[in-house]
Image: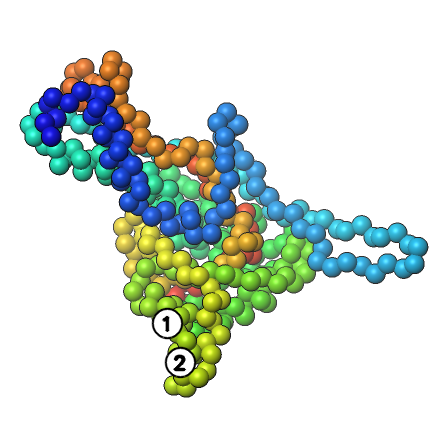
Amino acid sequence: MDLSTVTLTDFVRNAEILWIKGFNSIPQVARTSGIFKETPVPLNTGNTREFSEIDLEEYASKKAESEQSSRAKIQQGYTKIGTLTRVSKAIGVSFEMRTQGKYMEVQNKLTNLGTLAVKRLDLDLTHRLSFGTATTYDDRDGETIDISVGDTLALFSTAHTLRGSATTFRNRLANNPQFSPGSLEAIQTMRINNSFNQFGESLSVEDDIIWSSNDPNTVRTIAETLRSSSNNTQNNPGVINTFSGTFRHVILPRLDTTAAGAKDSTKAKYWGTACTSMSTAYLGMHEEPHVTTPSLGSNAEDFLTDDWMFKTAAGYMIVIVSAGWIGFSSGDGTA
């Protein structure tokens, strides 16, 4: 392909195809995991949203003959405000690239451009869990991000509070064990004993996913636990595996990373469980990842350099209201 003879219109058409190729090559793991509930934020509807939870009391009351039914108590839970953020990246395709046979270099640039906003969204979503033991973290752009939940505590804590009760609960597993059949049972026990509505009444929470990093040993151990046809810690092949079919494993490849996206070995053993139906983690999508291409006579066609500029961008907000839907272990054995 001789780029020097291609018109800008034809080049842009090809560039959009390459961008889509790059976009489709990146699995949106965190976004499609079920951990986050997605809601649209339409254009011209402001840059903030309020997310809250409201609980009814758990049980009905007795009603005597001819007496009025008692009114159900309603308790608003905690509230968090989400604010839109926008990410973008631009690249230039130089005159030299277009006229000196550098087709592969151009193709790689445009294909890679298609991945940048998607990967940043996945990083920002995943880092809500990666840094879930803190109330803030500094993202890869150096901006301090508030990731506390509605009770002002970190997502993973041993003393979460309720609005309508003095009861507290934990969602961080004691002693933070690595994943094993025994620790999975321990986190299930913790979740059963620490699931409440805002009145402090016990709830029945059915966690349906196990989430973890892509640490090979953790991934293998989870696979053995969930997929073995019998209890994998026993020799008796006739014993039914009670974990089989209970959970879906979500592998988050960016879970054990620093704010900049580099590998962080201290997070390699992070894992937990979650109830997707009760999740209060929200992704508000305002601007889907897309590419903006140059046109003749526009500022994207640089008069001084002869570069053709291409840009990818996305806009979204991420909010986690409460912590009662998720359990966590750092896997480092700390008390």
Q: Nearer the viewer, residue 331 or 126?
A: 126
Left or right of residue 266: residue 62: right
Left or right of residue 72: residue 265: left
Residue 132 horizontal/vertical position (percent): 44, 53
Query: Mark 2: which amino acid?
Result: Thr
Residue most toward the top? Answer: 297
Q: Nearer the viewer, residue 311 or 81?
A: 311
Q: Let me know if residue 266 appears in the view.
A: no
Q: Quadrant of residue 325?
A: bottom right
Residue 163 horizontal/vertical position (percent): 65, 51
Residue depicted at 48% across the width and 39% down the height:
284
Query: Mark 1: which amino acid?
Result: Glu
Q: Calculate the distance from the C-alpha at mark 2 to the C-alpha at mark 1.
A: 10 Å
Is 134 above or below relative to 94?
below
Residue 250 horizontal/vertical position (percent): 40, 58
Q: Secondary structure at mark 1?
A: helix
**Res 129 label:** none
- The residue carrying mark 2 is 233
**Res 224 label:** 1
Residue 227 horizontal/vertical position (percent): 40, 70
